[in-house]
Amino acid sequence: MTQAHTCPKCGAPLQQLVKGACPHCHAVIDKVLASEVIIDARGPIWRVLLLGAGGKPKKVIALVQSAFGRSALDAKTLVEAVRPGMPQVLVDGITGRDAITHFQSFMKVGAEVRTEHRHGADWRAGATTETIKR
């Protein structure tokens, strides 16, 4: 059962956030509460990039296969195509919640990954393992 959350400022129910704020009063929601609410109401504008396979490329290849239904050869080709400054798109056109789920899964197997969201014609970085390592 999903727990209902309310805005600490106006008391409105929080079913989704718009740019990290309450859609009713626009109060910025703290990260703890925000992590339990739908990440974003902007829709499927997210993608996940593979920056590197880390020390366990076989685990990353296996995860690419299972997470996205790719063949072993396709997954291996994608992982091996990553070069410094040339990341590979793992998945595109997904919601923020799905992007974070994939990000966490790949991070657990040691891959270097980044989420990005569309902003007009550009892409803006979201979560990245580069930040977490620092």
Image (spheres, rainbow, N blue to C red):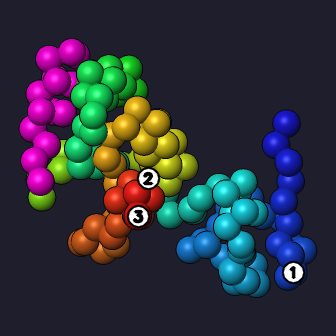
Please tell me how crowded label 1 is: few (under 14), some (14-19), or many (20+) other residues with Cα within 10 Å: few
Q: Decide: marks 1, 2 in contact (CB < 8 A)? A: no
Looking at this view, is 1 or 111 the one in front?
Answer: 111
Quadrant of the drawing holding the C terminus: bottom left
Q: Residue furthest top?
A: 72
Tag 3's secondary structure?
Answer: loop
Tag 1's secondary structure?
Answer: loop
Query: Which residue does the image show at 27% across and 39% down from the upper left?
Result: 54
Q: Nearer the viewer, mark 3 or mark 1?
A: 3
Query: Which residue does the image show at 59% across and 58% down from the upper left?
Result: 39
Count of number-bearing discs: 3
**Which quadrant holds residue 73?**
top left
Residue 44 percent across, percent down from the top left: 43, 53
* Residue under pointer 2: 44
Please tell me how crowded label 3 is: few (under 14), some (14-19), or many (20+) other residues with Cα within 10 Å: few
Relative vertical location of residue 92 with respect to residue 43 in this rendering, above or below: above
Which amino acid is tagged 3?
A: Arg
* Residue under pointer 3: 134
- Which stretch appears magenta? 69-84
Question: Is 78 one of the magenta-colored residues?
Answer: yes
